[in-house]
Image: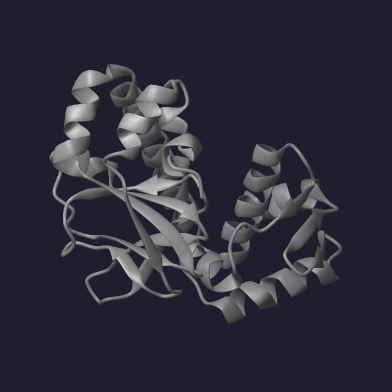
Amino acid sequence: MSEHICAEIVPIFEQLDHDELLKISSLVVHHHFQKGEVILSPNTPSQLVIVAAGAAKSYQLSASGKEQLLSVLDAGDFEGEKNLFGVQNQELYVETLKNSAVCTIATSEFQQLLENYPSIALKLLKSNAEKIAALEKQNQLLNHDSVEQRLATYLLDLAKIKNNDQIVLPMKLKELASFLGTTPETISRKLHIFSDRALINQERHTITIKDSTALEELKNA
């Protein structure tokens, strides 16, 4: 791992030069976590968490304690930016999905960076707006009455984002089920139904949409 790998792979630091990346690197603390470890929660110090290698998930808990997946984080993704603007974390959790290398930057030190590099603050605001838009999209999905509608909408949206009818599910069935507000067994069953109807072809995590028109009709039913 290079000296400032975390800074190099995070989009909000893209336009910084070598010396500026080194400055950020001096504030970074490197960690290694095993699969299933919680690296950010309402009880952890206020900080920005960057996934350098591996994968993690961000989620919140309902009043009943049920986990609701918000996103899957890959290398270069980060969480905790709300902390940087003084918003206390009261419900967000980040947990590793596999053994992972993670970098953290304390909020107090990062706020000084924002004063020195205003462009980072603008990129953070853009990133936060994108996350809000994604959450709004997820809420729209959950408003569909049937799991089939939610799944059809999700697959069509993913194909639209990738601009390809062949897509790779970015998360395991357990995470996808949490994201769509159902169970892994139900997701697996609905995917088999879609395959039997010749709407899709599935090979492990790769799905090819074969009848987008029928999926659109199902989505809008």
Query: In this orientation, which residue lies closer to the viewer: 206 or 32?
Result: 32
Residue 131 horizontal/vertical position (percent): 40, 41
Rendered residue at 50%/60% (across/down)? 55
Query: In this orientation, which residue lies closer to the viewer: 39 or 220?
Result: 39
Residue 32 horizontal/vertical position (percent): 40, 65
Q: Residue furthest bottom?
A: 185
Residue 134 horizontal/vertical position (percent): 45, 43
Residue 39 sits in quarter: bottom left
Rendered residue at 77%/59% (across/down)? 207
Vertical relation: 17 (above or below) 160: above
Residue 198 horizontal/vertical position (percent): 86, 63
Left or right: 136 as drawn, with respect to 203: left
Residue 188 sits in quarter: bottom right
Rendered residue at 81%/59% (across/down)? 199
Q: Is residue 16 visible?
A: yes
Rendered residue at 18%/38% (across/down)? 109
Query: In this orientation, which residue lies closer to the viewer: 154 or 114?
Result: 114
Residue 168 sits in quarter: bottom right
Vertical relation: 100 (above or below) 47: below
